[in-house]
Image (tube, rainbow, N blue to C red):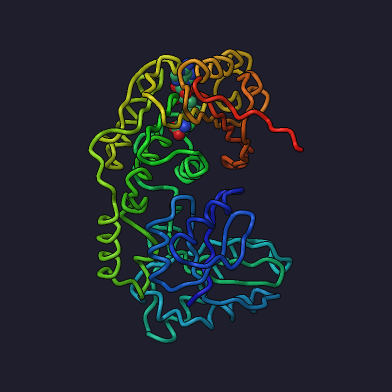
């Protein structure tokens, strides 16, 4: 059993924790941008395969007190690296260093890498290559104040990079964020998922993956854990086979993506094909107000431009007002959502949000606004006065 730190975007640990628990692992601690659990190397492989909202799965090998570069070097060198790193392989070191003991984190990376390589050379007479590529064995050094920890990064590159987004179009959402948005919605897999203004299709593709219970890691071909010694390809192959057997079969599309830019729809189709879910997604080039809405039940989500990176704020006021009208007139019986980083523009929607959920897109604070659109026959319950 090892302590395992799983990182994610800010504000997502609550969703990530639920995912980790659903995989049968305990939550030992919650952080601002991550959760801690404990488990085996095999558990790390499973986490990498199944987690939708995580960025990295980090397996901790050692924690110690380090008040100088030499103390950091000694702590790293005390780990049995010959059991982890192939002496003829390749290793890279990344770090988070905030300590008065050193003012240059690159120097910390080099010193940490030296400790690993020196240990392996002392024990085996050979030494692995090292450099900055994250495609092989990756180690993560955390050194804040006098607390040092060394981890194997079993993801290597961020799990958010699923490998299907061949065409990012413009202002795409990160895949982990899109998955978190969907997991926060009142969307029942098996019902319709509508995504006008789909851009590169991230929300639609993540909904398709979730809808058929496909492990998000199946679209990746490389993980950090594949480059350390305990990795047994047979164990991972069996895990992949098991994941495939848990997929729900669905032949007919249940996701609808539209955008008024033909290039966005081309990007969505290209990315959905790479993710293996094109058959589950219907696409169309049209203004969002013309998106054909299937009968309820279902959920609809829009991620309009919010005037920071794209678009112009005054021109967007009408767009947000039109979204409100579109919800009221065409989306009866739906759960409707707007994901935006502009809290002023959303006031022009003219509907009372049931919920406002905070997310971060990189460093930008955003909100997911939830609206319940009644279908006319179903009215909101009248407030009952307390006796
Ligand atoms: C912020 S991007 C969406 C990004 C998307 N969530 C992704 O992950 O790629 C907004 C999209 O809305 C589209 N759009 C803007 N105005 C529109 C309109 N009136 N009707 C339909 N699509 C529109 C743009 O072409 C753009 O692709």
Give the answer, above or below, for where 325 lies relative to 386.
Answer: above
Which residue occupies the extreme front position in the image? 387
Q: Residue at x 51, y 56 (%)?
A: 18
**Residue 222 appears anywhere in the view:** yes
Which residue occupies the extreme left position in the image? 251
- Horizontal and vertical percent for residue 7? 54, 57
Which quadrant holds the C terminus? Answer: top right
- Horizontal and vertical percent for residue 13? 58, 54
Q: Residue at x 26, y 41 (%)?
A: 250
Most foreground residue, 254 or 236: 254
Specify the quadrant of the image occupied by residue 5. bottom right
Q: Residue at x 30, y 28 (%)?
A: 282
Q: Residue at x 51, y 29 (%)?
A: 336
Which residue occupies the extreme right position in the image? 387
Give the answer, above or below, for where 357 lies relative to 256.
Answer: below
Give the answer, above or below, for where 245 lies relative to 201.
Answer: below
Q: Is residue 56 left or right of residue 218?
A: right
Q: Is residue 80 left or right of residue 285?
A: right
């Amino acid at each position: 059993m090892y302590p395992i730190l799983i990182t994610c975007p800010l504000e997502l640990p609550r969703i990530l924790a639920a995912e980790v628990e659903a995989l049968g692992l305990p939550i030992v601690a919650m952080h601002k941008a991550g959760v801690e659990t404990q488990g085996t190397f095999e558990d790390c492989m499973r986490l990498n395969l199944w987690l939708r909202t995580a960025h990295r799965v980090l397996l901790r090998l050692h924690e110690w007190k380090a008040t100088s570069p030499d103390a950091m070097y000694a702590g790293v060198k005390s780990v049995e690296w010959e059991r982890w790193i192939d002496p003829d392989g390749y290793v890279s070191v990344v770090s988070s260093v905030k300590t008065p003991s050193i003012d240059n984190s690159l120097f910390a990376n080099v010193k940490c890498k030296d400790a690993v390589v020196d240990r392996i050379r002392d024990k085996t007479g050979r030494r692995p290559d090292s450099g900055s590529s994250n495609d092989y064995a990756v180690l993560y050094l955390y050194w804040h104040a006098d607390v040092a920890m060394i981890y194997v990064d079993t993801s290597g590159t961020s799990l958010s990079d699923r490998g299907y987004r061949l065409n990012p179009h413009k202002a795409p959402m990160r895949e982990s964020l899109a998955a978190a948005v969907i997991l926060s919605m009142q969307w029942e897999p098996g019902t319709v998922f509508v995504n006008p203004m789909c851009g590169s299709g991230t929300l639609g593709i993540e909904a398709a993956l979730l809808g058929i219970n496909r492990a998000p890691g199946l679209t990746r071909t490389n993980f950090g854990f594949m480059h350390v010694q305990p990795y047994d390809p047979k164990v991972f192959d069996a895990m992949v086979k098991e994941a495939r057997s848990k997929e729900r079969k669905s032949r007919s599309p249940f996701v609808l993506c539209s955008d008024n830019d033909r290039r966005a729809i081309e990007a969505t189709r290209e990315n959905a094909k790479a993710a293996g879910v094109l058959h589950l997604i219907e696409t169309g080039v049209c203004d969002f107000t013309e998106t054909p809405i299937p009968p309820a039940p279902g959920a609809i989500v829009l991620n309009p431009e919010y005037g920071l990176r794209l678009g112009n704020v005054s021109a967007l006021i009408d767009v947000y007002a039109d979204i409100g009208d579109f919800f009221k007139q065409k989306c009866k019986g739906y759960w409707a959502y707007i994901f935006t980083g502009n809290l002023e523009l959303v006031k022009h929607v003219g509907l009372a949000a049931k919920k406002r959920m905070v997310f971060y897109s990189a460093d930008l604070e955003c909100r997911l606004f939830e609206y319940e659109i009644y279908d006319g026959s179903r009215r909101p319950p009248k407030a009952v006065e307390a006796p």
